[in-house]
Image (tube, rainbow, N blue to C red):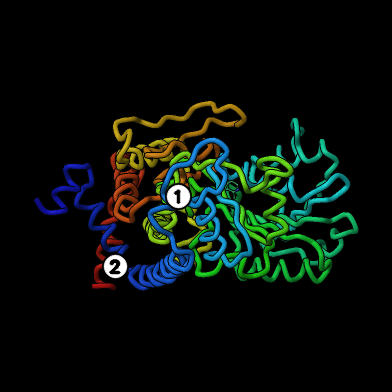
Amino acid sequence: MSLEELYGTMGVSPAVLAYGEAVLDSLRVRFAAIDQVAEYNQAKVLQAMQVNRVGASCFAATTGYGYDDVGRNTLEKVYADCFHTEAALVRPQITCGTHALAVALSANLRPGDELLSPVGRPYDTLEEVIGIRPSQCSLKEYGVSYRQVDLLADGTFDYDGIRAAIGPKTKLITIQRSKGYATRPTFSVEQIGKLIAFCKECKPDVLCMVDNCYGEFVETIEPSDVGADMIVGSLIKNPGGGLAPIGGYICGTTECVERCAYRLSAPGLGQEVGANLGIMPAFYQGFFLAPTVVSGALKGAIFAANLYERLGFPVVPNGTESRHDIIQAVELGSEAAMIAFCKGIQEAAPVDSFATPLPWDMPGYDDPVIMAAGAFVQGSSIELSADGPIRPPYAVYFQGGLTWYHAKLGILLSLQELCNANLVDLEKLHKITADLQAQFR
Ligand SMILES: *Cc1c(COP(=O)(O)O)cnc(C)c1O
């Protein structure tokens, strides 16, 4: 059976496949650049593992207090070396990205201190951590105040506003790299470096923390290479490589990371406790695979952007923009199109491919939300997934894919479902296919 026939049995029509292949022909140069970043980052990870003499003894399970846990201690050195920081805290006891960020903030802010976000509103879940939305045990309850400087209308930093907002109480500056589910641009590491330099010029002893979620290994440098005192993220996103079943990390200066360890466990205990419960092989192997996995997810995002943009759907980032995270938004214009898109993503999944995603009223959201995910790890968004609130402009946020080929099939099937529901102009699709074939073959 040919690949075209095999894809046919899985529901992809020859027309959609031909269109997808024609779009891919236009992306060879960009894909080659992504492969180069992945090769660099693979070497970076390997070097960190070799320098720290990762051996079979690192994979042994520990229980109880977990004193002298060689696997855990070595893994933290590997993360620190790879991200060029003095220290790292990488733990299954950090339950998710929000938890890692909450630990980093609450460990390094004391009563009377002020937290500043110079990049506008933070990720939804941080609103309760900070106390922007009233919440039990928020930073606000403990006497930490919060200020925010919004981005300018064109998405750039409001340097005058930031200078004015940095005061005697400003202790820590939080910078979110990825746009998450907002409409602002994602920042490049270089842009973040300039912002950090500016903040430290205004106040040399201010701490700069970067929420690095969805950004790891997208570029060859990380925010820790451009002055961040801490970078923070989730292991069920990029750096877990799809294999980590839980966890978070904080990499940064010894002073900051030590405080995080005392906050995570207990004053006096810090980094010395925390059994690994046998999870180390997944953490090491996931980190080893992460550069390749991220490159596949990036290819998927760029493929989706170009596939849908050429058919007239607005996409963010657009088809040609450079990338600083793995999230792709596609504005589909109707509820029916969102349902069709998510149906296709779900059909392509290795797990729960037989399920049909439908909008539902999720606690905490004003509008019904639709989600497609067929993941090995629950909630993992480095695995192929799509979701969005059912409201104008009816945008789905699409991310992940442990392999490029899986991402490709998911995107092809999403388009197929739109075609099957008569939501795509097939004549236009044929015409673009022919034009691209003439241009690139
Ligand atoms: C995912 C994410 C978080 C929170 O991570 P969870 O693991 O969902 O708690 C925080 N910030 C950004 C930018 C994210 O993408």
Toward which corner of the image does residue 133 lie, by quadrant? top right
Name the residue rendered at 55%, 56% in the picture. Answer: 76
Mark 2 burial class by Cα count in 10 Å: few <14, some 14-19, many 20+: some
Q: Where is residue 269 in the image (x, y as percent from the top left)?
A: 68, 43
Q: Where is residue 334 in the image (x, y as percent from the top left)?
A: 46, 39
Mark 1 burial class by Cα count in 10 Å: few <14, some 14-19, many 20+: many
Q: Position of residue 301 (x, y in %)?
A: 42, 56
The residue that mark 2 highlights is: 25
Earlier-in-chain disc, 1 versus 2: 2
Q: 88 above or below 370?
A: below
Q: Is residue 271 left or right of residue 402?
A: right
Tell whether label 2 touches label 1 (CB within 8 Å). Answer: no
Three-letter amino acid code at the position of disc 2: Asp
Q: Can residue 126 be seen in this view?
A: yes
Extreme-right residue of the structure: 168
Q: Position of residue 44 (x, y in %)?
A: 46, 69
Name the residue rendered at 38%, 50% in the picture. Answer: 401
Name the residue rendered at 73%, 44% in the picture. Answer: 268
Q: Which of 434 and 214 is in front in this view?
A: 214
State the mark number for residue 283: 1
> Tag 2, which secondary structure?
helix
